[in-house]
Image (spheres, coloured by chain):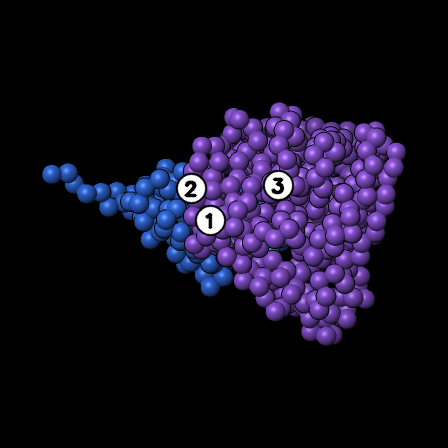
Amino acid sequence: MRVVAATGMLGYGYEADSMRAAAESEIDLVGCDGGSTDGGPYYLGSGKASCSRAAVKSDLAGMLELARITGAPCVVGSCGTAGTDVQVEWVWEIVRELLHELKFEAKVALIYSEVSNEVLARAVSEGRLRPLDGVSQLTTEGVSGIERTVAMMGIEPINAALEAGADIVLAGRCSDAAVFAALPIRKGVNPAVAWCAGKFLECGAMCAEPRGPDAVSVTYDNESFTIIPLSEDRTCTPETLTEMMLHENANPFLHREPNGTLDLSDIIFTQEGRSVRVAGASFLPTEDYSVRLEGVRRIGHRAVIVAATRDPRLVASIGSYLAEAEERGYVMVSAMGIGREDYAIHRRVYGLNGVLGQLEFEKPTTHEMALIFEVVARTSEIAQAVASAFRSLILHMDFPERQCTEGNFALPFSPSGLDGGEVFEFAVWHALRLDDPLAAFPIAYNTVSP
Amino acid sequence: MTVSIGELARICRSKNAGMALVTIDVSFDDDLTYMAAKKALTPDVVGGLYRVEPVDVKIISWDRMRTLKLTFPRSPRSGGPGDLDVYGCQLHAPILALPVNIEVQEAG
């Protein structure tokens, strides 16, 4: 049994030679993780993808070609970054285009993962929601403001689709490891081995040295698996695999999946050439089948001003200058008839503390500073109006012993008020207890015969 | 001898562990430096550096891999109002700057 992960995220790319190498052997699955919450709440709220259509299509082209040559099914999880219905269909549209271009007949399964506010409200009243990572419990009032929520599926819906004869599975929000664990478990691989392999496959060649976007593959036996990067120039090592265990997890040893917990406390790595054999994983099934919900609410619209100063006296007094500008700005905006409750401003000063904010401990030693001035408001029009008012103020406001009386900041763009798009924030981060692992994930089938 | 973690650690990195938590991994090449850092990085110290309650700081020490993992709540959450770092990957500097005491054995 051999599984290939094309790369760490659909759209990040891989080396042509690596995929060519993959085609030379028998493989049972080619998979790729298509999304993440890494990039913040925007993608879930807007339905836009964080990778471009061109990048995603390019990666899918190689994966579908590999699937066609080897006869292996292809699974993509968390399509379109957040796995929303619109994003699943966005990837489906690209796949359909490619199937016609490659003249490849295939049965395609689309697995949806959105959770309506009605379902959320019912879950609240039935006590089936558990807050994660210290967030507060969801209330019925809280649910009404939610823009969109997805549930992170496990292996069951993917296996249902494969069971139904799907050649290509495009899944909504999905556990990263489940993308790669589903088929092997269905074919009888020890779940502990399959889940553990999935954990390392999901980031592609980020688990190898040198790190990078590229393909890796895994072969399985009863108690262990062997992972190898497909590029001859890369090597997996115990250190690189250890970093994967640490990656984005509060606990490197215990990883909760919908149907149980993967325990890597006793993991053993054995270097074998460019590959590493991994043993010692265990999987503890749970009675409490639950899926992680990710949901966002809409906050408003953002306008951004980028401005930089090279004036030594302003650089030296930037803190007090901006504090005064802010106070005057509020008065100015109020006089325009815009209420304080309709907008919020956030300023970041690079060269001072733009990255760490209040946590910064170094004193500035710079000759220039950049200000990113952000307005988030109920509407785009209000955001732009507030940004414009503050821009004219900071450009021209006087300060003690000012020499640069024509303007305080270099504005690099015309227009100076950039449209920062819609703004969302995470509002659901809860585990939902399910009686039926399939009930929350409807599957639609399409056959493409070019 | 007092040295900063930044001069000792092979890896010192931060990243979101989900949208509500930040996790920081610090890895060392030898037991002497690892043990010195392990002693220095307590919940109180980490809480002070990142302005979180010590009780909300979870520290896992993986002795075999000479790695410390520090996890605590993000404020704001990823992409939340005024967020400076959506991915949470540039929060490691306060750890780099932290001084630790290394007990150096005198030769002979």
Q: Colour of chain A?
A: purple
Q: Is residue A307 visible?
A: no
Q: Quadrant of residue B73?
A: bottom right
Quarter of the image with the N terminus of chain B in it: top left
Circle 3 sits on which residue? A3
Q: Mark 2 or mark 3: which comes first in sequence?
A: 3
Front residue of A107/B46: it is A107
**What is the chain letter for disc 1?**
A
Residue A133: quarter of image: bottom right
In this view, the residue farthest toward the left is: B108
Q: How crowded is mark 2: few (under 14 residues within 10 Å), some or many (20 or more)?
A: few
The answer for which chain carries disc 2 is A
Q: In this view, does A222 lie above or below A71?
A: below
On the image, numbered disc 2 is attached to which residue? A270
Residue lying at 55% horizontally and 37% vertically, measured from the top left: A206
Residue type at tag 1: Ala
- Mark 1 lies on residue: A279
* Label 1: how many Cα within 10 Å (few below 14, some 14–19, many 20+): many
Hue used for the chain lettered B: blue
Badge 1 vs badge 2, beta-carbon distance below 8 Å: yes
